[in-house]
Image (cartoon, rainbow, N blue to C red):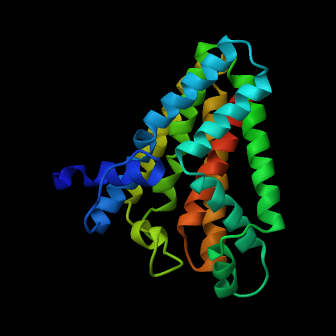
Amino acid sequence: MSMAFDAPRLAIGTLTVIPVGTLGEIDRRTAGRAMTLAPVAVLPLAVLACLVGWLGWRIGLPGLLVGLIMVATLAAGTRALHLDGLADTVDGLGSGGSSERALSIMKRGDIGPMGTVALILALGAQSAALTEVVNGLHGAIAAGLVICCSRAVLPIACRRGVPAARPHGLGAAVAGSVSAIAAVAVWLAATFVLVGAAILVGRWWQGPLASTAALGAVLILVALAVRRLGGITGDVLGAAVEIAFSIMIGGLAA
């Protein structure tokens, strides 16, 4: 397959369970392009979650159950990697000691009490917010758009100047691979789409507010990761996605 498709294949294969075949050696340019394509790469998953939410509402399921089913769909469609990253990042950043110890905690397969609480809060907030947003077809579409927009934090977290915490792994492959111009362009485009999502649920001004809040939270997360860990990891990127989605969908539900 042509190398021109390596970037979208990398983005889709990394962010969803959709099979993309075997990829060859990925250079920095391809990695950067993959991160800028992240909001588009999850479109199939967003459409699926949108349909699940709308069908659940259509057949009269309780609102909270609809939200939980949509969250479960997202978890299944991403192999729960973002949720795992959130838990590991909270455990690592919340631990005392050196960066080596924090990275060691994050690399382990188990989840500590802080990570468990973070998962409960994130899943609960997302489910409750989806309950408010998905009250018809327009609400389901808005939720799907938010799923795509939340992935726009990846080029922000992978912009040039942000180092990797480890010499190997996903973080090392994509850290610093996106130009500042491309990162800002993707974020502005996502903000524009988020305004459209807010219009669908009747409150356009909540779009830019949610976008600004999510951006601020992710910038703080990346700064903490650089200070405590020495850079970003794949877990930090997963945490960024979950935090952004929680804030964005919560902003539309407020």
Q: Is residue 179 above or below residue 25?
A: above
Where residue 65 sits in the image (x, y, percent)? 76, 28
Image-based side of 249 in relation to 168, left or right: right
Can you see residue 209?
A: no
- Report the number of numbered marks: 0
Image-based side of 162 in relation to 119, left or right: left
Where residue 28 sits in the image (x, y, percent)? 31, 67
Q: Which residue is drawn at 44% across and 55% down?
A: 14
Where residue 110 sits in the image (x, y, percent)? 71, 70
Q: Quadrant of residue 143?
A: top right
Residue lying furthest left: 2
Q: Is residue 152 above or below residue 250?
A: below
Q: Nearer the viewer, residue 198 or 126?
A: 126
Q: Residue at x 55, y 75 (%)?
A: 231
Image-based side of 132 in relation to 207, left or right: right
Q: Nearer the viewer, residue 218 or 128?
A: 128
Image-based side of 116 in relation to 30, left or right: right
Q: In this view, does 89 lie above or below 164?
A: above
